[in-house]
Amino acid sequence: MNCLRIGLVVLGCFVLNACNATKTVIDQPTPTINSGLTQQQAQARQARISDVSYQYQLDITDPQQLRGHAQLSFSLTDNREPIKIDLATAQVSQFTLNGRPLYPNYDNQVFTLPARLLNSGRNQITLHYQRPYSSEPDGLYRLQDPIDGQDYLFSFLKPSSAKKLFPLFDQLDIRATFSLQVTAPSSWQVISTTAAVEVVEEQQARRWQFAQTETISPYQFSLHAGPFHFWQQQGQPSLGLYVRQSQMQQVEPQQFFSRTQASIEKLAQRLGVDYPFGQYNQVLVPVSIPFATESSATNLVNERDFWQQQQQQSQQPILSDLTRQWFGNLVAIKWWDQQWLNESMALYISQQLTDDAHQSAVPQHTFDKQQAYNEDLLVSSHALQPSAINPNSPLQHVDAITQQKGLSSLKQLNHLIGDRAFYQGIQDFLTQYRFQSTPSESFLDTLAKAAKTDLTPWYQQWVLSSGLNTLKAEFQCNNNRISRFVLHQSGLDSPQDNFKSQTVKIGLFTKGRNALHRNSTVVVTYDGATTDVKRLVGSRCPDLVYPNYQDWGYVNVELDNKSLQTALFEIGKLQDDQLRSMLWQGLWNSVLQGQLSLQQYFGAIFVNLPSETEPQVLAQVLNQLKQAKVYLEQVQPLHQRYARQALNGVEQMSLRLAMQNSANTTLRDLWFEQYIHFATSLSAQHHLAKLLNGKEGFERLQLPQQQRWGILIHLSRYDYPNINRLLNQESQRDNSDSGANYLLAAKASQRQSQQKRRWLNKVMQQTAPTTPTQFAQLATVMQHLYPSEQKALSQATAEERLAQLEQLDSHRDEKFMALYSQYLLPMSCSYNGKQRLQNTLTQQAQLSTVSQRGLKLAIQAEQQCISISERMLKHGT
């Protein structure tokens, strides 16, 4: 829910994980991608062009810019209209079309070739060009290692940034063969889509010749170069691992090779198609990667993610990345609105294989799917396959809906047609459309043929429609036996048009002395507004019914009254970890939807949570509690007395359970982190300060540097005495880049009105940040400027922030406005505040799509907070 938008503001030490880069990691903001090509324009160009091949000779020995010679060959169906070739911000020294020198019409983005010089049939273009390297991860990005000063090149060509590397038709449905020759410094390694077939030593340089590719989309091509340390393992396919020289000691190559080879074999067996390329190279990059970079046979991985995978020995990220070599590279989508298929298939197959190998207490999908539920209940909800794509941000819609709801939809489809037909359809799809671009409908068609059923209704319900429906069980009992059992489905805006059909498993439970016992389960396919479940008639009357047992369906579950009361008081007695997780999430969703009061929710917390011993479930509920804290602080002063009681209760419970679990470090750390977050009393804050300076101990507890900063950020927010002295001491103790980010967050979060004003002025000034470091600092300030407990300070500048929104929007880019909308649109939890936001949306008509979306989400968040407050009043404080 939009609670996440306001909850992030107060999660100081967690939010700063994104900034927790040591000097070896160079995080950059996500680049703004400008495609500028609508689907209609792309279709028109693709309809005329075929049989495309590119030959490139690149020289990357100059540290400032690349020099290139390109030859483009293609066939045209007709020469009645001009044709456009994409190349961004380049200097062209020579250009010929079909052997004739030409001074083309060039607007720094595209060449427009006149129709009179084109052939109906085969055409050839040659040109010499040079262009600077990109200063952010977009195109061919040049990065200097701050440790040893060595330079590296990384290509980021998705969705439409190949034109920042070389001239071509830069759209995913114009596939071509690529031939590449690269001249690079003699000490460098060069990695591309295919293997090098020849490396020739030249004077202070080496010339690399790569094999011609299969027909691939532009974004599938890759070029990475630099003085990498690398490891290789020969085989089918050959494996390569490349890392900066300064980071080589942190890599365990044999672990990577063994896990990757095992993953390739598992995927080939599950999908029924061999790995489609002769090599698989993984290149570690020290920047945040904005989206999956599934270039053929090569994968970019953020270094920190790779270190974490090594430590946790996590298999799923490897499987997910590799699945994209089949879905995305072997077979590519036709246009960006179909990206859901690649994203969700990568998650679904990798999670299936991971769950098969390691049965966890709660499948990861159960947790991840909640992100999709959150997104699907927002005003910004969209279909898996959106009806319209912004040509300047074609992947803007790739989010939890595209990924997690897509995963859930595939899971539901698997249940609908069965394993045999599902995987036979996948094999047929990958075989039939090998090295082609095809729409997602082709995937459904092959599955429908394998299952011998019509999947059009499923496609309409799950791929082309948006929103999250609710499922509720209603039952009656006579003589302790069920006499009637009905499932009710309700939609959001237009339920009659939005009903879905899916298969779920219903679980029935009864109370025991020390446990809730499962009596029976039944599999049901429901459809329409009501579905009678006659098979349950005569079964023992349950105390708890859960109509999505084992999480088969993608649906919001509303408990019936009897089951709700059972859950509130007995959830801790359930032995099923997954069901406990889903019930806890259901209770919190009921709070967000105004069906359950915060008092009832906190009552369930105090009764049941102390007995929770499954770390996954405990972490989930503690995160919900952090969001609940935001609402407790927003509904003040109306509910001030109850809020203080609840906050103190969680503070004391967290410390007590952290101490009680001293022998279980996982549970202890979870509870101690919660204690830091809920330390709102002065005595608790004194205790944290004593732990920092070593004047008080905590059995077996060591405070890592990140947690020390988390404590200090929390103390800063609550205006702890002598906080500046503590911050200065800590900054001397930790003078790293990450320490500087933490210090900035602590300073911005301090409860001082004049200081807030100075920080806000820095954010609002018209000069945009010019470097990634400046932008990262600005983002840190925005994230921590107005924590939820500083509601009065936020309201003091609320009118000004809204009044200047349109002016800011006209001068700043999408990245800035997305952050501004997330963190600096005011919340007051009142109808006046909601109307203030609505007036801004109505009156400032020239706002960008990003800012309009932010305002709509803020309005929805205000209404959600109002509903929570009103529900608390009905319950009584």
Image: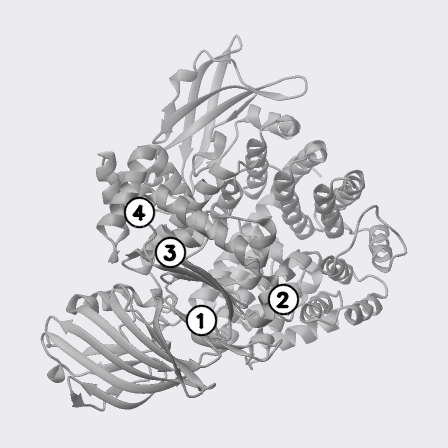
Give the mark nearer the N terminus: 4 vs 2.
2
Callout in the foreground (3, 4):
3
- Which image quarter is the C terminus in? top right
Q: From mark 1 to mark 4, how far is it between C-alphas?
A: 36 Å
Q: Nearer the viewer, residue 506 or 764?
A: 506
Q: Secondary structure at mark 4?
A: loop
Residue name at image x 49 percent, y 50 percent: 259
Residue 32: assigned label: 1
Q: Position of residue 519 (x, y in %)?
A: 52, 17
Above or below, 241 against 618 in this view is below
Of the two numbered discs 2 and 3 on the same chain, state the one appearing first in sequence.
2
Amino acid carrying label 3: it is Pro
Q: Amino acid at mark 4?
A: Val
Locate residue 753 relative to residue 164 in the image: left or right.
right
Q: Which residue is mark 2?
A: 21
Task: Kindly tell me whether residue 832 is visible in this rendering.
Answer: no
- Residue type at numbered disc 1: Thr
Query: Of the numbered discs in the image, which one, if any, rests on residue 237?
Result: 3
Question: Which residue lies at the image location 24% right of the left edge and 69% below the top edge?
Answer: 41
Task: Tell me, for residue 286, which label it has, or none.
Answer: none
Please state which of residues 657 and 833 is positioned toward the viewer in this rendering. 657
Do callouts 1 and 2 mark residues in contact (Cβ within 8 Å)? Answer: no
Label 2: which secondary element: loop
How far separated are the C-alphas under marks 1 and 2?
A: 22 Å
Q: Which residue is mark 4?
A: 273
Label 2 – label 3 distance at C-alpha? 34 Å
Relative to 483, 434 lies left or right: left
Helix, strand or loop status at disc 1: loop
Relative image position of residue 697 (x, y in whole percent): 87, 50
Labels 1, 2: front one: 2
Discs 1/3, front: 3
